[in-house]
Amino acid sequence: MSRIDESRPFIPVGIAVLTVSDTRSLSDDKSGDTLVARIEEAGHRLVARAIVKDDKTAIRDQVETWTKTPEIDVVITTGGTGFTGRDVTPEALEPLFEKRMDGFSEVFHRISYDKIGTSTIQSRATGGVANATFIFVLPGSPGACKDAWDGIIKPQLDYRHMPCNFVEIMPRLDEHLKRSQG
């Protein structure tokens, strides 16, 4: 089972939070606020935060810009993962993924099932890696953001988490690019 190795140092990472919504602003963005509070409480750095409309191009452009920003190691989006006509976040971001994180969706749904039962199938939460940046695509509810952060993202962004974690592999995410230059 997983554990924290206290002999290892905590290494903070840079995180950007994107809320996808046609109706929210920073003043009433409870899901974004939930993520920001948890990021800061864990000791990581909030590097950027924004809200964009449910528009594939706007979502993709913002996330792609952040994946090219050296200070940002992780992008977390909230909103737009349902099945309505305006829910387009997975369609916007999955084409950016160089590698999909299928396990993220599976574990998210398992955690969510314990809380909301079969309603979890109404989320298309997903994750992947683009430009050596981890991307997590979460539903727009504060509860879903709590579940994803507390149950998956926080432990994986802790270098002390054993037997493995995302922080220890971050320096190797773009090694395929280095190989192709040689």
Image (cartoon, grey):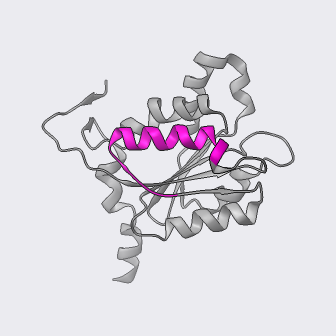
Query: Of 175 and 85, which appears nearest the observer?
Result: 85
In-front residue for pair 15/28: 28
How many discs mark residues in the rendered view? 0
Question: Residue 24, position in %: x, y?
Answer: 72, 47
Q: Residue at x 72, y 29 (%)?
A: 121
Does 13 sit left or right of 55 as displayed?
left
Q: Is residue 178 left or right of residue 77?
A: left
What percent of the width, then of the height, locates residue 55?
77, 59
Q: Is residue 165 magenta?
A: no
Point out the image quarter for the C terminus: bottom left
Q: Quadrant of residue 63?
A: bottom right
Give the magenta range: 27-48
Rendered position, 17 above or below 107: below
Which residue does the image show at 71% across and 19% down from the upper left? 118
In the rendered view, does 3 fall on the left or right side of 65? left
The residue most toward the right is: 85
Q: Main secondary structure of the magenta part?
A: helix
The image quadrant of residue 61 is bottom right
Residue 174 screen position, x and y as percent: 39, 67
Within the magenta stretch, is there residue 41? yes
The residue positioned farthest toward the bottom in the image shown: 182
Residue farthest front in this picture: 27
Q: Is residue 27 above or below residue 57?
A: above
